[in-house]
Image: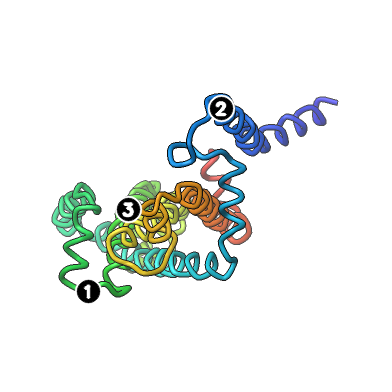
Amino acid sequence: MRGQNNSFKQRLQSYLPAISLLLIIPIWQLVCSLFEFPPYILPSPTMIFDAFVQVESARWVMHLWATLRVALFGFILSLCISIPLAMMMVSSKYLSKTLYPLLVVIQSTPVVAIAPLLITMFGSGEGPRLAITCLITFFPLVVSATTGMLSTPPELIDLSRSLRAARYKEIFYIRLPYALPHIFSGMKVAITLAIIGAVVAEFVAAEQGLGYFIQFSTSFFKVPQAFAALIFLAVVSLILFKTVYWVQKYFFAWTLNKEKS
């Protein structure tokens, strides 16, 4: 009986976020109806849904693919750079002391301020947009990978060195597997930041993408349409976050147990 109650509570807890989101929609609709907000200030959920339906599906797919392409490529590029860099920083204290302050400076610089400069210097192609996405997603990946590798139990490192294991084996066979839970935590943060980076780049210079679509809609006071694109972006971010979680769950399930502990 207790087991059934615990399983019911666990299922209820897993559904609570969805239930809370569903409760927001009627409250939102009620507030808009009672106070009669004009659509250009706060559109109601029904207006947003109508605006979403009125836009052609092919147009949604076009803008979605433009944003998703930059976000995913930027995320993968950032992942391919950050993990090897974290390995090098763990292997060399001198390199770590040299690069870490530079990474903090890069992270502290507002990307919104850098974006127009990159577009001006390199044009309005996908290159600058990928660079902007990388700048946003890079730091959490490097920090999580470095923290995970440095948190490897010292006795494992001492054992490998007593067996005269090569340095690359210490990194690949001991430190990297132990860092995987931290890396996946950084990936979950970075994948959502990748969408933000792609949208910021589209605000500056783009002719396609959901960020461009939001800017275009608001410039013509089509606020319900802009809200529809914004909600679409939020759903895409949640799906990408869940995708990283599913990859971790089905291919690296032991890292989830490590996170819980």
At label 3, the amino acid type is Thr
- Give the residue at x 38% y 58%: 216
Is residue 70 among the parts visible in the rendering? yes
Establish if 182 lies above or below 122: above
At label 1, the amino acid type is Gly
Give SS at disc 2. helix
Q: Nearer the viewer, residue 166 or 45?
A: 45
Q: Residues within 10 Å of mark 3 (few under 14, many from 20)?
A: many
- Give the residue at x 56% y 46%: 48
x%, y% of residue 170? Answer: 37, 62
Tell me the residue that label 3 is attached to.
146
Q: CA distance from mark 2 to mark 1?
A: 45 Å
Q: Nearer the viewer, mark 3 or mark 1?
A: 1
Q: Nearer the viewer, residue 152 or 160?
A: 152
At label 2, the amino acid type is Val
x%, y% of residue 96? Answer: 20, 55
Establish if 105 lies above or below 63: above
The circle drawn on residue 123 is 1
| Marks 2 & 3, CB-CB < 8 Å contact | no
Q: CA distance from mark 2 to mark 3?
A: 47 Å
Q: Nearer the viewer, residue 152 or 8?
A: 8
Tell me the residue that label 2 is attached to.
31
